[in-house]
Image (cartoon, rainbow, N blue to C red):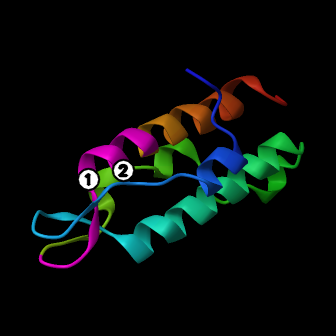
Amino acid sequence: MDTLTAEKVRNQVFKLTFFNEGYRIDDVDSLLDRIAESLAAWETHHPESVTVTSDMLVPSQLPVARFRETYKKDGVDAFIEEAREALEFYETYRYH
């Protein structure tokens, strides 16, 4: 597995669904922005600027919708788990 970086988060693309229950696009995109900012803070040695921690990343807390364009849940859940692991690594092993 490649190390997740702020740039990779910014470039992440998820599959869309319409009829199935999925995560609302605006909410996921907002969370991705915050994750990217936090990873960038770690990458540039500024942990004081981190706004999202690993324990804050719980996919089931994202709002869901149906019968509108949403992101497929499984792809988002997997990506959030990857982000949680990356943040946990920084929190545990870096700059302490």
- Residue segment shown in magenta: 67-79
Expressed as whole percent of the image width and height from the top left, the position of residue 91 reads: 68, 34
The residue identified by callout 2 is 76
Q: Residue at x 25, y 74 (%)?
A: 69
Classify residue 37 by image quadrant.
bottom right
85 up-or-down from 20: above or below: above
Classify residue 24 by image quadrant.
bottom left
Expressed as whole percent of the image width and height from the top left, the position of residue 72 reads: 26, 55
Q: Is residue 27 left or right of residue 21?
A: right
User: Is label 1 in a helix, a strand or a loop?
Assistant: helix
The crowding category of the residue bearing disc 2, from other C-alpha atoms within 10 Å (few below 14, some 14 to 19, many at least 20), is many
Number of numbered tags placed on the structure image:
2
Expressed as whole percent of the image width and height from the top left, the position of residue 38 reads: 70, 53
Q: Residue at x 49, y 35 (%)?
A: 82
Q: Is residue 37 left or right of residue 26?
A: right
Marker disc for residue 63: none
Q: Residue at x 78, y 28 (%)?
A: 94
Q: Is residue 34 left or right of residue 85?
A: right
For badge 1, the amino acid type reads: Lys
**Quadrant position of the C terminus in the picture:** top right
Residues under numbered marks 2 and 1 in contact, where contact means CB atoms less than 8 Å apart: yes
65 up-or-down from 81: above or below: below
For badge 2, the amino acid type reads: Val
Pick whichever, 1 or 94, lies toward us.
1
The residue identified by callout 1 is 73
> Would residue 52 be seen by someone viewing this image from the given angle?
no
Does the magenta portion include 72?
Answer: yes
Pick whichever, 45 or 73, lies toward us.
73
Q: Is residue 21 left or right of residue 88?
A: left
Pick whichever, 53 or 2, lies toward us.
2
